[in-house]
Amino acid sequence: MDLLFLFEWIDTSMLAEISKAYGGVFAVVQTFHLGAMVLLGGMILVGDLRLLNITMSDIPAPVVLKNTERWVGYALVAIVLSGIFMMSAVAIKLYYNVFFLSKMVGLFMGVCFFYLIRKPLLNGDHSELNPWSIKIIAVTSILIWFSVAASGRWIGFS
Amino acid sequence: MLNQLLFDLALWLDAQQWSTDLHESYYVYNWVESTHVLTLIIFLGMLVVIDLRMLGYIFKDVPVSKVAERLDKPMMFGFAVMVVTGFLLYYAIPVRTTTSIWFRIKVVLLIAAGINALLLRNITKQENLSWDNDPVPPRRVRISGGLSIAFWAGVIMTGRMIAYDWWDCHKAMPGFMYWAAGCVNELAELD
Amino acid sequence: MNKKLLERMSVLVSVAIVVGWGIFWGTQVVAVQEMLKLAYG
């Protein structure tokens, strides 16, 4: 399915007029995007490190996950909104960029993995679960989100 | 005088072959820069959880000192990587970075954040903190936590702005800006 | 969905992601590195 029409529409939207015209505004929004990345990554990482028993091992894992998941939601909203703004400025270039595609696929996988697998399986009691299952899920989560963040930076290099 | 000293230091670093090699490398500079940006997640990611606990927004049932202690190691690991990669980035392009107003503000903010962090660390490392188990800590702790987030947000912003050339030395700027950014050659031409 | 089934599916999906996405993403990075080398070599 060819999505070029969607990128062309965003590229000529009112949002794009603003994002293309004011480099300073773009830079500030990008900073906001980076801050949201820190919040999102940090909250997910704290949860995953707990699942791997690397940190906060004397705090029950479900407590760590429950405390961090609200902030994951806030960060996702911030990161997507700031991302859409930035995308509008360079939409056509992004359409042809493999790392942007990677990032979106990774983001979609990451969000689905978080809300459809990690949260339902691990929010409750862990005693019935195989410890290795928990570790595999934590590692997968870290890998997906790492690829999203790294893809984001590599958009600039390709 | 400090401007001249810093500029001379930058010139000395710039003259070194490794500096040029790093700047002109196919892969290494990109990897160093990517590592610097991504390690923010480890370093500031842990720090923001600690600061949010200081503000009473997260882990309210867990003592403040415990949150700070548990996340300290990954945070410090992240900090070490940030310092090493940060130095390498400076070393690759020393002259432009030294005369970047954004970099200078970033350094000031880093120092401010560091002092704030040290003061907070001294407080939380004390025994028998009366407020340790409080869901919402006392005002001075909340202010410190809030300042920490503000300083580090500033570090991120100024760090990102370094790449923009709006106030590079070769641009026409008010004399005060040349001084603030340490544009030694342009200042000399003004005289 | 019962927990045991969710657990098994989660592990399967995780392994598939780690292997599949890992290989795909890794090859993209290598491809871009080679392109940079060609462009600036």
Image (cartoon, rainbow, N blue to C red):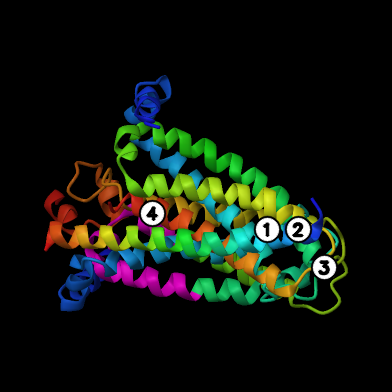
Rendered residue at 73%/74% (across/down) = A131
Q: Same chain for labels 4 and 1? Say yes or no.
A: no
Callout 4 and callout 3 share a chain: no
Identify residue for label 3: B63
Mark 1 residue crowding within 10 angstroms, few (<14) / some (14–19) / many (20+): few
Q: Is residue B133 left or right of residue A134?
A: right
* Viewer-nearest residue: A38 or A97: A97
Residue at image x 28%, y 71%? Answer: B91
Q: Which mark is residue C9?
A: 1
Tell me if mark 4 has few (under 14), some (14-19) or many (20+) residues whose alpha carbon lies within 10 angstroms of its own: many
Q: Which residue is mark 2?
A: C5
Question: What amino acid is labelled 2 in the image?
Answer: Leu
Q: Is residue C5 magenta?
A: no
Q: CA distance from mark 3 to mark 2?
A: 37 Å
Using the rendered view, name the quadrant where residue A50 is placed: bottom right
Give the amino acid at mark 4: Arg
Could you tell me if the residues under marks 4 and 2 are in contact, i.e. CB atoms within 8 Å? no
Is B172 situated above or below B116? above
Parent chain of label 1: C
- In this rendering, the answer to whether A96 lies above or below B87 is above
